[in-house]
Amino acid sequence: MTIFYKTIFAIALTFNTDLLAKGQPTEWQMGFQEAASPLMAELSGLHDFVFWIITFITVFVFVLLAYVCYKFSAKRNKTPSQTTHNSLLEVAWTVIPVLILVVIAIPSFKLLYKQNDFSNIDMTIKATGYTWYWGYEYPDHDSIEFDAIMLTEDELEEGQPRLLTTDNMLVVPVKKNIKMQITSDPAGVIHSWAVPSLGVKMDAIPGRLNETYFNINEPGLYYGQCSELCGPGHGFMPISIKAVTEEEFIVWLEEAKEEFASNPDEQIVLK
C-alpha cells in the first residue's frame, strides 16, 4: 500500500469528528435521523407516504364527525330520519379501506423483500452481543476479531458523543453491501443491533444467527445502540461505525491484521 493512502487514512482518523458524525441523534429531533443508506431512504419515504394517508384519514373522519354532530343534533333534527341502510355507502366504506391497504401493502412488501435480499453481498461481518458490549469478527478478512467497549466520559475526546463512542470502531467501506450476522453470547441474554440512520435493527439471540445488511452512501461516523432491554448495562453497549473509502478500508485491514487478526498470514480479500 502506498504512503499516500496511509497518509490520507491517518488524516481521516484524526479529522474533526463533528464533520463526520452524521449518523447520530440531534437536539430536539422529532423524526428519523438523516438517511445514510439506500434502505433507510426508502423506509423514510414509505413512512412519509403512509403518514400523509393517515393524516388525510384523520382529518376526514374528524370533519365528518363534526358535520354529523352539527347536522343531526337533536336541536336541528326534530324528526329523525328512519333510514337504516344505504347500499352505496356500505360498499364504499368497505371497498375504500381495502384499496387504501392495498396501496400501502404493495410498496411495503417490495421494501420488505429488499431488506431480506442477500443475493448481492460484498462482505460479511459477525456481531456478537456480550454482557455488556459488542464483539466483531471479519470472517472474510483474516478473521479479524475485536471487542468494542464504550468509552467513559473521562476517556472521550473532543467531538466524540457521550454513550455512543467505543474504543474500537466497526470500520466498513462505503458503497458496499455489508451483511451483518448477529448473535449473542450463548451464556448471555437477548440484545438488538440497531443503527437508525442505516435502517437496520436485528435481535441478537443466544444460539441463533440472524442476518441483515446495509450499504452506507458516504464516509462518516454512524452510531447506534442495543435496542433490547438486556439488563443493567443496556444503555452502555453502543455501536460505532466508521465508513471509509475502499482505499482507506484496505489500509485499515493491513493495520488491523497485525493488531486483531487470528490468521495474519492470510491474504486480504475485498470484493
Image (cartoon, helix red, strand yellow):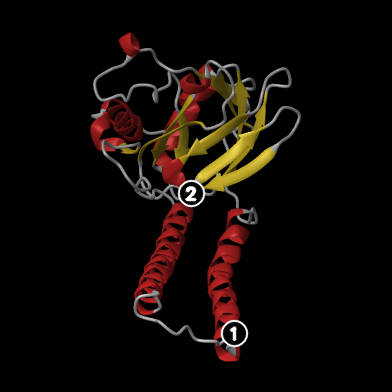
Say which of marks 1 and 2 sits in front: 1
- Residue at position x 38%, y 50% in the image: 35
Sequence order check, earlier mark of 1 and 2? 1
Q: Secondary structure beneath disc 1?
A: loop
Q: Which residue is mark 1?
A: 84
Q: Please, is residue 113 above or below residue 224 in the view?
A: below
Res. 235 visible in picture:
yes
Q: Quadrant of residue 55?
A: bottom left
Task: Tell me the kind of residue under disc 1.
Answer: Thr
- Residue at position x 43%, y 21% in the image: 166
Q: Is residue 204 left or right of residue 248?
A: right
Which mark is on residue 215?
2
- Residue at position x 30%, y 42% in the image: 29
Answer yes or no: do the residues labelled 1 and 2 have beta carbons within 8 Å? no
Residue 258 image offset from top left, x and y in percent: 52, 19
Q: Work out whether residue 172 or residue 40 is closer to the camera in this orientation and state it.
A: 40
Q: How much space separates mark 1 and mark 2, taking CA atoms?
A: 57 Å
